Amino acid sequence: MHSVQNKAFFHNMAGIALPITLQSLLQASFSVVDQCMTGQLGTVSVAGIGLGGKFAGIYAVMAAAVATGAGILIAQYAGKQDAEGVRRSFWLHLGLCGVLAVGFAAAGWFFAGPVMRLYSQDAATSAAAAQYLRMLAPGFLPLALTDLLSTLLRCKGNAKAPLYASLASAAANTGLNYLLIFGHGGFPAMGVAGAALATTAARCLECGCLVCLAAGSLPKDTRGSLRPGPISRAFARKTAEILLPILGCEFLWSLGENVYAVIYGRMGTQPCAAITLTNPIQSLMIGALTGLSSAAGILTGQKLGEGKTDEAFRDARRFVRLGLAGAALLSVGIVLLAPLYVRMFRVEDTVRQMTVYVLYAYAAVAPFKVGNMILEGGVLRSGGKTGYAMAIDMLGTWGIGVPVGLAAGLWLGLPIWWTYWLLSLEECVRFAVSAVVFVRGKWARNLTQSS
């Protein structure tokens, strides 16, 4: 019996985690390709993309938070075979994403210059960042729809369609980067703006592909989720109870990340560029293991929706152990390959050396980052007690990370790698608190018992 359960767990995990992991790695390739190609343009362009991407990242995190809230409910209703609950969850969250997309796109398009001047006092760097952000803004709405459709399909057992859409998008992004950044094929050399335009076009393509794939691949009982319909007040209240803490948590966490970016930017263009050059490695690291986090949230939520709390606990522990082991192995690889990685970029030797040291600091805390992604971001939220995750995030980011970063980087003037490592210790605290919350078990709830 035990071996049968193990086989079922790994089969279900692989069916969800592997396509999501591949999709996440493809999405991470957006930033990798941007960084590698624009890294040939010099330190200012690298720093500009990093800062422009940080503000755009606030929206991306908020859109992903809405998709997370949708996924919590959709996973449990899918476990209960409740198609009406799936439909209501999808459309309510899509409306919220639309409002967020319009607001952030307007800010990114019309106020890019003033916003980016808050991040850096260097005129050239802030101008490059504003140029990058302005061209990213039109892709905000397609990104939100892509997140929600991907969530819907994964919760219904079809994780391959988002993968196929991401494959087409990544290929388009790579080709367009080559054409637009450097001016090949008759196109003008647009530099930083070309990188952003390529990303926006690729996101629109991904969204269009996913809409077509979703319409043709969803089972009959779920196709109704693609049609709008009435939503009760009771359901809206339940959604707000789950979603508002997630939105608050992710917004404040992302705002904290942007405070980190301001700290790096005000430490100088070279330290800022060094941090930016580590972003592709961080994206690939998280992308390689994000499938475990998503699968943990979906499968744990489905078990809770079925009323199988003990199995939910068992599966959650397995996900955390797998994530920690995988992150430790990848950290060793980062340490070994860091000196080779920095040679890809046409930047000063000082920036290269800074980047190597920051990568070493990242490798030291990466297992805790991944553990938080799975335990806090996936498992604890699957039962709808999203306030727990919010409190843990705020403790780490604003109680530890931001004060330590300000003290280390701006007041004490420590090198960028020490500043990064010290503020990243908040990940260790968050993981310890999340483990205690998990063991106590109050997070595990069945949300399908009332609407």
Image: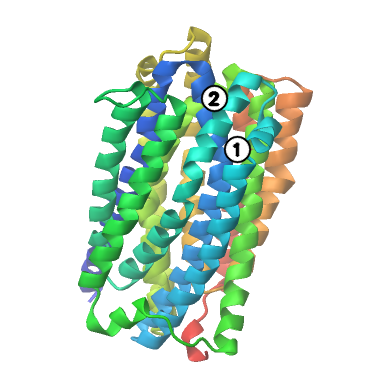
Q: Label 2: state its secondary structure.
A: helix
The location of residue 160, given as percent across then percent down, is: 23, 60
Can I make out residue 336 in this image? no
Residue shown at the point (62%, 27%) measured from the top left:
126
Cα distance, mark 2 to mark 1? 20 Å
Asked if residue 391 lies left or right of residue 348, the reply is right
- Image mark for residue 424: 1
Toward the right, the furthest residue is 411
- Image mark for residue 47: 2
Residue 179: quadrant of the picture:
top left
Residue 35: quadrant of the picture:
top left
The location of residue 244, given as percent across then percent down, is: 63, 68
Q: Amino acid at mark 1?
A: Ser
Asked if residue 133 lies left or right of residue 77, the reply is right
Q: Nearer the viewer, residue 159 or 172?
A: 172
Q: Nearer the viewer, residue 267 or 53?
A: 53
Q: Label 1: state its secondary structure.
A: helix
The colour scheme used to paint the residues is: rainbow
Q: Amino acid at mark 2?
A: Ala
Vertical arrangement, residue 204 with respect to residue 420, above or below: below
If the image is split into quadrants, where does the N terminus sit? bottom left
Which comes before the other along the chain, label 2 or label 1?
Answer: 2
The location of residue 434, given as percent across then percent down, is: 58, 58
Q: Nearer the viewer, residue 131 or 335?
A: 131
Asked if residue 43 lies left or right of residue 389, the reply is left
The residue carrying pointer 1 sits among few (fewer than 14), some (14 to 19) or many (20 or more) residues within 10 Å by Cα, namely many
Residue shown at the point (62%, 22%) measured from the top left:
416
The location of residue 181, given as percent across then percent down, is: 37, 26
Can I make out residue 300 in this image? yes
Vertical arrangement, residue 320 with respect to residue 254, above or below: below
